[in-house]
Amino acid sequence: MVLFRRLLGDVLRARRMQRGMTLREVSAEARVSLGYISEIERGQKEASSELLASLCTALDAPLSEVLREVSYAVALEEAALVATPISVNAHTRVGEVVASAA
């Protein structure tokens, strides 16, 4: 399953590191607790639109660019899921329906 919050956190962390900023610096600039930003970067918390706008401002990153990067990352993960081969039991015949406990 593709988790938007995890991919958003990855993009925000990458942007922060590209700028050479620490969590403390982003925290002070965005006026958001350091711990909360850390949880967002690790994909453990969802960022509200207001919080995301504050983080983007602190990172000097247009919101549209951040969302475009996240969208691209989501598309890559979705493509990887589709490309994953489905294992078939060697005893299953073509057209045979197999019940799954999952």
Image (cartoon, rainbow, N blue to C red):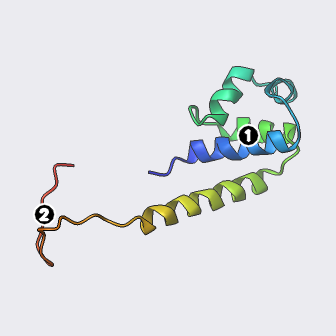
Give the residue at mark 1: 13
Within 10 Å of disc 2 (Cα), the crowding (few <14, some 14-19, many 20+) is: few
Q: Position of residue 56 (x, y in %)?
A: 80, 42
Q: Quadrant of residue 95?
A: bottom left
Q: Position of residue 4 (x, y in %)?
A: 56, 48
Q: Name the residue rendered at 66%, 41% in the picture.
A: 9
Element marked by disc 1: helix
**Left or right, residue 98 beside residue 47:** left
Q: Name the residue rendered at 13%, 63% in the picture.
A: 98
Q: Name the residue rendered at 70%, 29% in the picture.
A: 37
Give the residue at mark 2: 98
Element marked by disc 2: loop
Within 10 Å of disc 1 (Cα), the crowding (few <14, some 14-19, many 20+) is: many
Taking the view exactly as shown, the residue that stands out farthest to the bottom is 94
Taking the view exactly as shown, the residue that stands out farthest to the front is 90
**Left or right, residue 5 beside residue 10:** left
Does label 2 or label 1 sit earlier along the sequence? Answer: 1
In this rendering, the answer to whether 45 lies above or below 14 is above
Q: Nearer the viewer, residue 38 or 54?
A: 38
Q: In the image, what residue type sits under mark 1?
A: Arg
> Label 2 to label 1, Cα distance in Å?
43 Å
Q: Position of residue 58 (x, y in %)?
A: 86, 36
Q: Quadrant of residue 51?
A: top right
Give the tally of numbered discs. 2
